[in-house]
Image (spheres, rainbow, N blue to C red):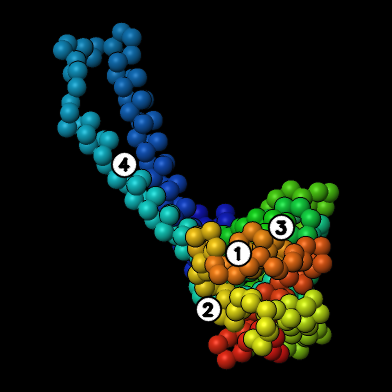
Amino acid sequence: MSAGLTVLAPAASAAARGADVLYFTLVGFSTFMAGIFIVLIAVFSYRYRKGSQANRDKPPTHAKGLEAAWTIAPLMVFLGLFVWAAYDYARQSQPPDDAMPIFVVARQWMWKAEHANGRREINELHVPLNTPVKLIMTSQDVIHSFFVPAFRNKRDVVPGRYSVLWFEADRAGEYPLLCAEYCGTDHSAMIGRIIAMPPEAYARWRDEGARHPGVAQRGYALFRQHGCIGCHAAASTVHAPELAGLPGRRVHLADGGTITADETYIRDSILEPQKQIVAGFDTIMPSFKGQLNEEEIMAIIEYIRSLDAGRHAGERP
Ligand code: CUA
């Protein structure tokens, strides 16, 4: 196992080590199966070669038990591998509820990250160890792909929507961050590094460099500046949906469907408010398309996330 692992980047999360075990198990079984076929082909080719003395009287036409065995046994093994892989995949796709959000915006040709308190960085991403981290990512131009070999994790970053990638680093160190989708001339230079550090060191790093207001504070300023507050504040006379506690909630829509209010839903509601109307509300909200850039939309979403039962939209975060 360890000899095989040296061909891969060192794994820096439990999920990455799990992926390696699955990978080598798959390669092992496939090699084993292929080996059986190769050996049998060689043995029979030699045994029944032209002119050999092998007994060719009464060749068997079928053997039900044998045929059933060699069909069912590999089927079970590979179905088992499928279930294992599907389970791992589902877990990798579903960030835990308490995951720490970091916003990432990709553009030709750099990665920009913003932490909750407003600290920003480019082509570097500092993360705390043993903490689930959830990246909410979008692109300003073309499709990029956020790839960290040490986490065995990769997700396309697409303009016009959010993609989410999560991981939990458990080994301190620096790991390469790559763009894994051809995105133009300097695609190959769109590289950076992930710096995984103990939680205390991360907190110190994050707080010492905050030159900007926190993301939620910036979202609050935009929320006022663009007039959202006129309808969505608790005291407003306009009938607008309640925003406190919205992220993650199931929302009933006017067309009878339901949807989970994730980042993509909130983003769509800001840019295309006519599309998914909440049941019981009128289609009076104007679109903010062209008025907000990706980083501003992310800030507003983070502001909405900062609201809770005790604090309503329109109040300072
Ligand atoms: Cu960005 Cu390739």
Q: Which residue is mark 2?
A: 98
Which comes before the other along the chain, label 2 or label 3? 2
Count neighbours of disc 3 (C-alpha within 10 A) and say few if under 14, some if 14 to 19, many if 20 or more.
Answer: some
Residue 94 image offset from top left, x and y in percent: 50, 65
- Quarter of image, res 233: bottom right
In this rendering, position of residue 119 left or right of residue 243: right
Q: Amino acid at mark 1?
A: Ile
Say which element carries label 3: loop
Mark 3 beta carbon near ligand 1 (under 8 Å): no
Residues at circles 2 and 3 in contact by the CB criterion of under 8 Å: no
Q: Amino acid at mark 3?
A: Gly
Q: CA distance from mark 1 to mark 4?
A: 47 Å
Count neighbours of disc 4 (C-alpha within 10 A) and say few if under 14, some if 14 to 19, many if 20 or more.
Answer: few
The residue located at (53%, 59%) in the rendering is 255
Mark 2 beta carbon near ligand 1 (under 8 Å): no
Say which element carries label 1: loop
Q: In the rendered view, tell whether residue 229 sits above or below residue 145.
A: below
Q: Amino acid at mark 2?
A: Asp
The residue located at (31%, 22%) in the rendering is 44
Which comes before the other along the chain, label 4 or label 3? 4
Q: Which residue is mark 3?
A: 160
Give 45 or 275, whichever is nearer the viewer.
275
Residues at circles 1 and 2 in contact by the CB criterion of under 8 Å: no
Say which element carries label 4: helix
The residue located at (34%, 47%) in the rendering is 79
Q: Which residue is mark 1?
A: 277
Front tag of 1 and 3: 1
